[in-house]
Image (cartoon, rainbow, N blue to C red):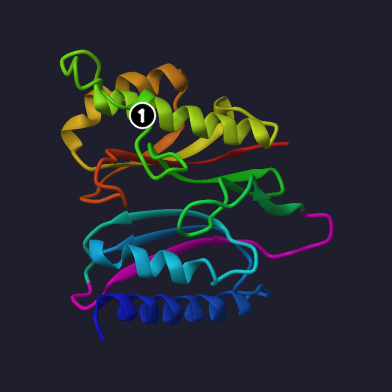
């Protein structure tokens, strides 16, 4: 028992049902370009991520956040965007899969690019120095601004790898651990998006790392 095994069982059950939905329209469970997963219990992140790595032959883009659900016993909710394979439709990951879930930086379907959610954590599992307020000068700089800038720089690199840029982003999801950070985040956001894409803002108590303040994922055009 325990929340860890339970979240794995719920994840597998949910993906099996999603597979049935895909099959009803001529697709398969592995034809997922992007998944958003909401976990209700911070202790379930590690077992979920470990199991997710083996859920797909070709991992989709992924965003994970912590959030409450309507179902009292529910440990997670999975929202996926899929595609129906057809001749000439280019599909596949952009960049090398990384992180505990093995998700790629983005997944391409034709001219659409689905970017995974990014937090300001590097390959070592730490918030990088350039996204951290210097401890000697705590009143200089803003942690949320630095993390927002770091995240958007990484997403810009992902779009560039797909032959695109952030000006072609058309949809954004932004997760903040403190909604009071919105105004500061917004000043950086406007620098990167003079003509901002449609956006949803979500308050999330956890983003998978104790020092992560923001997560962002994007959908845009490429090619």
Q: Which residue lies at the image location 25% right of the left edge and 26% below the top edge?
A: 143
Q: Position of residue 208 (x, y in %)?
A: 32, 52
The crowd level at tag 1 (other Cα within 10 Å; few <14, some 14-19, many 20+) is many
Quadrant, the C terminus: top right
Nearest to the observer: residue 190 or residue 160: 160
Along the line of sight, which residue is nearer the eye, 89 or 50?
50
Residue 148 x %, y %: 36, 29
Residue 15 is situated, as x and y percent measured from the top left of the image, at 48, 75
Establish if 220 lies above or below 153. below
Asked whether 88 falls inside the magenta stretch, the response is yes
Picture quadrant where residue 78 is located: bottom left
Residue 7 location, x and y as percent?
Answer: 33, 75
Q: Is residue 14 magenta?
A: no
Locate residue 199 relative to residue 180 in the image: left or right.
right
Q: Residue at x 64, y 63 (%)?
A: 58
Q: Which secondary structure type mostly characterizes the magenta part of the structure?
A: loop
Query: Which element is circle 1 on?
Result: helix
* The N terminus - image quarter: bottom left
Magenta residues, start to end = 71-89
* Furthest-right residue in this view: 87
Q: Residue at x 19, y 17 (%)?
A: 136
Task: Please tell me whether residue 138 is drawn above or below residue 96 in the rendered image.
Answer: above
- The image shows residue 26, relative to residue 134, as above or below, that is below
């Amino acid at each position: 028992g325990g929340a860890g095994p339970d979240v794995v069982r719920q994840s597998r059950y949910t993906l099996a049902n999603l597979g049935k939905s895909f099959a009803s329209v001529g697709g398969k469970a592995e034809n997922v370009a992007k998944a958003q997963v909401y976990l209700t219990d911070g202790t379930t992140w590690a077992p979920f991520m470990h199991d997710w790595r083996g859920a797909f032959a070709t991992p989709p883009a992924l965003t994970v956040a912590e959030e409450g659900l309507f179902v009292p016993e529910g440990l997670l909710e999975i929202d996926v965007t899929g595609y129906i394979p057809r001749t000439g439709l280019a599909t596949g990951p952009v960049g090398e899969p990384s992180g505990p879930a093995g998700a790629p930086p983005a997944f391409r379907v034709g001219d659409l690019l689905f970017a995974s959610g990014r937090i300001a954590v590097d390959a070592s599992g730490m918030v990088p120095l350039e996204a951290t307020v210097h401890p000697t000068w705590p009143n200089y700089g803003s942690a949320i601004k630095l993390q927002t800038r770091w995240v958007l720089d990484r997403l810009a690199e992902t779009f560039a790898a797909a032959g695109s840029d952030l000006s072609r982003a058309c949809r954004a999801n932004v997760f903040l651990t403190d909604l009071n950070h919105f105004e500061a985040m917004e000043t950086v956001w406007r620098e990167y998006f003079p003509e901002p894409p449609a956006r949803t803002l979500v308050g999330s108590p956890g983003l998978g790392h104790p020092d992560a303040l923001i997560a962002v994922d994007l959908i845009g055009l490429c090619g």
